[in-house]
Image (spheres, rainbow, N blue to C red):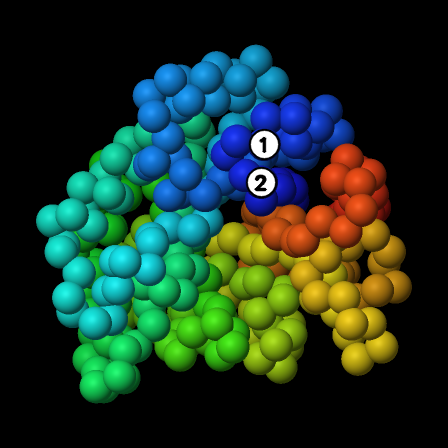
């Protein structure tokens, strides 16, 4: 299993720390890669090369201003945004783009569910998949819990959207936090099988622990092993830590890495 960490594009010190600790890759915001000026982008490319670490995955694919479900997004503008990000991403070692982006998926009032679903899979099929194919990049649809968006809330729903595109480079992600919020089980991961290509892990909190989505530090906090066993069984090879920082960043990062490596 390769372990990465979700981190801000401009967190230079944090990126250095992640590499020092031993993380296999970093996960940046796709939007940050697109929006960086040429100097900042080239500096980042050089930094990653020096540290011998790559940005193999990205999150925050589309801004909310590109609401695909509404049918009002300028698809030429969206396509240009996707093209720029994937072209740049390839230079950083990008392999998987995570499509969570609740603002871009959210179904607005007056739009039927079926219409929104069709717009999403046509967008992925006709615009995203061909561009991603040029750069040998895959898309992992991230289901977000109902508190965050009103469509594609579970791993199985994400897999259905991926299958609807009919494209081999469109797949699904499992996020331990969103799965907990939607009362999903590890069996849901096994059920989607090879459709699952990426994952996010955190301490999602429990009935006796009010902390939500913080860095995992103890094997007894949650069933991390069950999650990692399930994703490994279906062939998923990457897991990114996506969590809020409570306390010292380096300490959290190091403890989580040690825990994950001890599990798998």
Instruction: State whether residue 213 appears in this view.
Output: yes
Name above or below for residue 114 compared with residue 79: below
Name above or below for residue 56 compared with residue 145: above
Q: What x and y, as percent, mark residue 48? A: 53, 21
For the residues labelled 2 and 1, the Cα–Cα distance comes to: 7 Å
Q: What x and y, as percent, mark residue 240? A: 60, 48
**Residue bearing mark 1:** 11
**Residue bearing mark 2:** 7
Q: Nearer the viewer, mark 2 or mark 1?
A: 1
Q: Secondary structure at mark 2?
A: loop
Q: Secondary structure at mark 1?
A: loop
Q: Determine the image quadrant of residue 141.
A: bottom left
Left or right: 125 as drawn, with respect to 40: left
Q: What x and y, as percent, mark residue 121? A: 24, 67
| Mark 2 vs 1: CB contact within 8 A | yes
161 or 166, which is in the foreground? Answer: 161
Mark 2 surroundings within 10 Å by alpha-carbon count, few (fewer than 14), some (14 through 19), many (20 or more) = many
């Amino acid at each position: 299993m390769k372990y990465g960490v979700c981190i801000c594009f401009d967190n230079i010190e944090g990126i250095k720390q992640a590499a020092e600790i031993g993380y296999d890759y970093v996960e940046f915001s796709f939007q940050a890669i697109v929006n960086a000026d040429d100097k900042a982008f080239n500096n980042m490319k050089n930094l990653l090369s020096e540290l011998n670490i790559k940005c193999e995955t990205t999150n925050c694919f589309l801004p909310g201003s590109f609401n695909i479900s509404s049918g009002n997004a300028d698809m030429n503008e969206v396509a240009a945004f996707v093209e720029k990000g994937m072209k740049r991403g390839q230079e950083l070692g990008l392999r998987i783009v995570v499509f969570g982006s609740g603002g871009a998926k959210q179904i607005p009032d007056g739009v039927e569910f079926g219409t929104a679903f069709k717009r999403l899979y046509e967008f992925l099929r006709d615009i995203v998949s061909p561009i991603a194919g040029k750069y040998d990049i895959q898309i992992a649809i991230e289901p977000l819990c109902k508190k965050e968006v009103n469509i594609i809330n579970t791993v199985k729903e994400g897999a259905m959207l991926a299958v609807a595109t009919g494209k081999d480079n469109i797949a699904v992600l499992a996020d331990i936090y969103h799965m907990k919020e939607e009362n999903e089980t590890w069996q849901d991961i096994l059920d989607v099988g090879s459709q699952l290509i990426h994952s996010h892990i955190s301490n999602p909190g429990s009935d006796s622990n009010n902390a939500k989505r913080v860095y995992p530090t103890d094997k007894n906090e949650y069933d991390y092993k069950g999650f990692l066993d399930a994703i490994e069984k279906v062939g998923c090879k990457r897991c990114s830590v996506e969590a809020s920082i409570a306390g010292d960043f380096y300490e959290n990062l190091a403890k989580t890495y040690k825990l994950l490596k001890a599990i798998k």
